[in-house]
Image: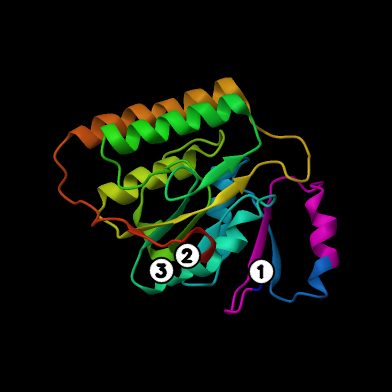
Amino acid sequence: AVIEVPHELLFVYDQPDDDCIKIVHELEGRYPNIRLIHNQTGIGVANAIKAGVGASKGEYVLIFAVDELGPVLALDDMLHLMDQGCDLVSCTRYAHGGRRLGGSKIGHTLSWLANKLFFYIFKSALTDCTTGIKMFRKTLFDKINFESGPVGWTFVFEMSIKAQLQGFKLGEVPIISIDRLYGGESTFKLVPWFIGYLKWFIWGVKIFKLPRKQESPPTVVRLPNHMV
């Protein structure tokens, strides 16, 4: 896939001995739009995202794990929805032809179940609140009061919930997500991750039951050509 719009690539790392640093330095000579960002606010996904967004220069921000291939394939469709007025576009693995392959079976099952309950029973506007593949306006990020700790990707779960509560316009693009395509050790830890996600699941369930002062308009879905 070729990205044909002006963009920059920010690689955020926590530790000065991170394996990615050497590789990114090798790429910098060929790709001047690449930048390394040292997250110095604390370890974990939440702090890494905050560091990356804070250092970014664009109007739109796309976040995803460095070992993900799917976001590149979905990028054109996500950009289209953003240009049509969406404030946040989230990929979905659980609707409209989206799928999740590989990774932890327990993690997959818990993620699938939580998202189905959230969508069908508690009327979430998004079918996959927990995916880390999201594009949003930088101005949206500044308007959300984030409270997630550094464990796992609970930060994006919180973002999905609070974006709905604040009435932002949302979009979804189905994606085939492949976990651990090139190997490597996963950072998935069942107990701490489960506790972190459960906290936001319970909070979301409670808050979604209450009357909302603001509510997002119907989610706009864009299907990639190969899924139409």
Q: Residue at x 79, y 47 (%)?
A: 18
Q: CA distance from mark 2 to mark 1?
A: 14 Å
Q: Position of residue 186 (x, y in %)?
A: 70, 35
User: x and y percent of residue 217 in the render?
Assistant: 23, 57
In the image, residue 121 above or below residue 142: above
Closer-to-camera residue (30/21): 30
Q: Which residues are magenta?
A: 3-26
Q: Are marks 2 and 1 in contact (CB under 8 Å)?
A: no
Residue 11 falls inside the magenta stretch? yes
Q: Please state which amino acid type lies under the numbered disc 1.
A: Ala
Task: Identify residue for label 1.
Answer: 1
Quadrant in the picture for the N terminus: bottom right
Residue highlighted by disc 2? 78
| Mark 3 closeness class: few <14, some 14–19, many ≥20 residues within 10 Å | many
- Judged from the image, the secondary structure of the residue bearing numbered disc 2 is helix
Q: Are marks 2 and 3 in contact (CB under 8 Å)?
A: yes
Nearer to us in this view, 191 or 68: 68
Q: Which residue is mark 3?
A: 82
In this view, the residue in front, 14 or 92, is 92
Whether residue 54 is visible here, answered yes or no, is no
- Above-or-below relation of 204 to 65: above
- In the image: residue 21, left or right of residue 80: right
Amino acid type assigned to the residue bearing label 2 in the image = Met
